[in-house]
Image (cartoon, grey):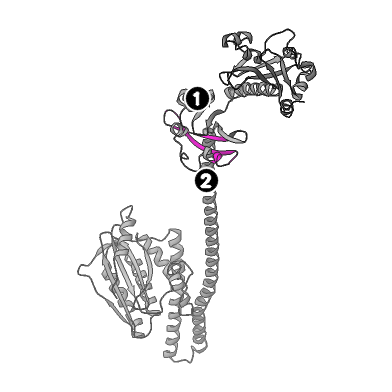
Amino acid sequence: MDEPFQSIDIIPQAIFSIDRNHTVTAWNKACEKLTGISRDDMLGTKKHWSAFYTFERPLLSDMIVDKAPYNQILEANAHKNIRAELTRESLEKEEYFSGLGGKGSWISFLATPLKDKAGEVIGAIEIIQDITRKKFDEEELRNNSEELTVIFQNSGDALCLFDINFDIVKVNPAMEKLFSRPSQEFIGKKCYSVFKAAECDTNDCPLRMIRAGAENIQAEVLRQRSDGASVAVECISTPIKYNNIVIGMISSYRNITDRKLAEEKIKNISLELKKINEELEIRVIERTSEAMREKKKAEDANKAKSMFLANMSHELRTPLHGIINFADFGIEKYSDAPKEKLLKYFEKIKNSSNVLLSLVNDLLDLSKLESGKMSFDFKESSITDCIGQSMDELAPLAMQKDISLSFQEPHKNPSLLLDEHKILQVLRNLLSNAIKFSSLSGAIQVHLEEDQDYIKIAVLDNGIGIPETERESIFDKFVQSTKTRSGAGGTGLGLSICKEIIEAHQGSIWAEANPAGGSIFYFTISKYLKAKTVSPKTLANFMASKTINT
């Protein structure tokens, strides 16, 4: 075998050659395999056309040897079969042969001239290749492409195709509808100039992420419509690859505005429900606390009532025992006892009776006040006269403990409507308590102040004082301060009666600590008892702004 034949036999492509007389000069093994014709049957003949056609017709190599004009070549190959002219002299075409290979085959032909040293054409060499598989792949790709185009165009989701340089290549009708833009406003433009999204020019850009190696990216984003408004969309971006190299990206957009609105509504409802739940919890806590307070109040009232009954039985029993005992002494000794002795017994009986009467009167007064059956005799009276009278009455009691009583009368003697008897009862109670709970050689002061709506009286002592936590409860019935339960106190009704009387005068009564030690009891009386209402703000401002100097 000649060396040229040995060289072309090792080439995997089917190759044959002809001389200037169209005689076959080479036919390699690959050519034998492709055409089914042996080299021996073909060498030296001019039948190379018979490997493909049933009638004699020139192949591309023949046309090169004949130096046929290009138009003639096109006509000879029905135009469509000539794919390209690789060089001025080489020709290439593809053609389908139904009988080749049993099932038909697509063959590509590439013919190139053979020249001598002078550049004269002395023959041609033609490379033959079975491209059937390639054609089937192209057909399948074309069919898939057509199918994808149908899907792309008719998808309910908005679809957009981008190249690797951020240019928009293609959009579907759903994309145009979603963003109210015709395709001309998308195609050929940079995506960031169209959408103007927050993630443009950042690392959150889907195409940047895909170029960096990401596969599928899903996000909820805002995209701009043609009118400048933003629409909430769910965006899913996927890379487009060729030979495993990213060449672009396809993104689908689904309008989720309604869903986001629904989510926001659900969120707001959840927040509202949470708020309602928290308010309910607060109310439950408040109601529970209120119930606990009421329970505590009821328990305290019950305890106070029990203490009152125990104390009252003691307070009632003491004068009753005195009455009975001294009456018994008088009965036993009335015949031989001196008159002075009997007189002393009667005085003891009278004193005990007065104590008993005072206790009973307190009980009756409180009962009447609470039931609204207590009558009041309001008339024009001098409050300073009431203060002076009460101090005169209790002066002997104060002298027994060497306690001084003082009252600096105002320049103007206030006169107002009040029940003089009831106000005297209040003053006596406050002064007697001050005397009772003050130490020996103490001092008790009474102050009076006046504003537009109220008269305010203060009784100051330097006695045992009242704990801060008890300054409101001591005005409840049957309640005494823990500092006055040692036996020095009374029934616990006096201050409760005072409160009822003062409130009937459209006033208030309260207790505070004396900065100098002891307590200060305040009460106010309205200057306008005939008025239907008294300004709470006026009263509050008056009581807060006035300071009693000790």
Q: Is residue 241 above or below residue 154?
A: below
Residue 418 appears anywhere in the view: no
Kind of residue at disc 1: Glu
Residue 275 horizontal/vertical position (percent): 51, 48
- Badge 1 crowding class, 10 Å Cα cut-off, few under 14, some 14 to 19, many 20 or more, is some
Residue 295 appears anywhere in the view: yes
Q: Nearer the viewer, residue 166 or 153?
A: 166
Q: Which mark is residue 176?
A: 1
Give the label, 1 or 2, closer to the camera: 1
How many marks can you see? 2
Marks 1 and 2, how far apart in space?
37 Å
Residue pictured at 76% horizontal, 18% vertical: 35
Q: Which mark is residue 296?
A: none
Residue 318 horizontal/vertical position (percent): 50, 80
Q: Nearer the viewer, residue 145 or 107?
A: 107
Kind of residue at disc 2: Leu
Stretch in magenta: 209-237
Residue 319 horizontal/vertical position (percent): 48, 79
Q: Is residue 350 above or below residue 423?
A: below
Residue with the mark numbered 2: 271
Q: Secondary structure at mark 1?
A: helix
Outermost left residue: 411
- Badge 2 crowding class, 10 Å Cα cut-off, few under 14, some 14 to 19, many 20 or more, is few
Residue pictured at 55% horizontal, 70% vertical: 306
Q: Is-magenta flag for residue 236?
A: yes
Outermost front residue: 118
Q: Please give left or right for residue 82 compared with residue 12 in the image.
A: left
Q: Is residue 454 above or below residue 50?
A: below
